[in-house]
Image: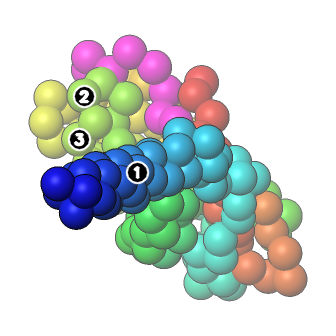
């Protein structure tokens, strides 16, 4: 009779201990998820997009560049584009590649000397202003910087 009581108390303690282990195994990652702050990207990150000498003054060029973005615990390396206009040796404008109507990709129409969105035919002037179409506002712009002949494009987008 005494050995049954000992066995029973042993099993009770083992089950309670196992329950505690399972609770800890579930609670520790959940607590870490809730309490540890995810990393976020600084909004002032600039990435090199092109050499200033690659671009012709007054002619917009589509520039492709890569940006590393931290999203929570994931690090993403994404391809991005911008339409960059070199105004002179000190100033560039980089337009975000989406139309401000519904986000289609627009392009520079050399013949018409304006940006044309093929989706609903919005047109934009070389400085991004709406010329025609349903687009509600001028093209959005990236913050840019020029450093040692390199065009740096920031992650921040300025809406007009
Ligand atoms: S998405 Fe460009 S005009 Fe509609």
Image-quadrant location for residue 122: top left
Q: Nearer the viewer, residue 13 or 106?
A: 13
Decide: is 12 above or below 110: above
Pointer 3 residue: 104
Q: Is residue 85 above or below residue 156?
A: below
Q: Are marks 1 and 2 in contact (CB under 8 Å)?
A: no
Q: Alpha-carbon distance for marks 1 and 3?
A: 55 Å
Residue at x-position 79% and y-position 61%? 145
Numbered circle sitting on residue 20 = 1
Determine the secondary structure under disc 3.
loop
Name the image quarter holding residue 101: top left
Residue at the left extreme, as displayed: 119
User: What residue is pinned by disc 2?
Assistant: 102
* Quarter the N terminus occupies: bottom left
User: For mark 1, does the 10 Å Cα neighbourhood hold few (<14), some (14 to 19), or many (20 or more) residues?
Assistant: few
Count neighbours of disc 2 (C-alpha within 10 A) and say few if under 14, some if 14 to 19, many if 20 or more. few
């Amino acid at each position: 009779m005494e050995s049954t009581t000992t066995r029973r108390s042993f099993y009770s303690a083992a089950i309670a201990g196992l329950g505690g282990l399972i609770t800890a195994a579930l609670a520790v990652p959940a607590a870490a998820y809730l309490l540890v702050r995810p990393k976020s990207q600084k909004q002032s990150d600039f990435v090199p997009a092109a050499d200033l000498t690659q671009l012709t003054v007054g002619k917009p060029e589509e520039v492709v560049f890569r940006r590393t973005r931290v999203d929570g615990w994931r690090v993403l390396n994404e391809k991005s584009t911008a339409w960059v206009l070199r105004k002179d040796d000190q100033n560039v404008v980089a337009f975000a590649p989406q139309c401000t109507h519904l986000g289609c990709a627009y392009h520079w129409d050399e013949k018409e000397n304006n940006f044309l969105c093929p989706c609903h035919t919005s047109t934009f002037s070389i400085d991004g202003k709406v010329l025609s179409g349903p687009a509600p506002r001028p093209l959005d712009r990236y913050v840019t910087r020029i450093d040692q002949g390199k065009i740096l494009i920031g992650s921040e987008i300025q809406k007009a």
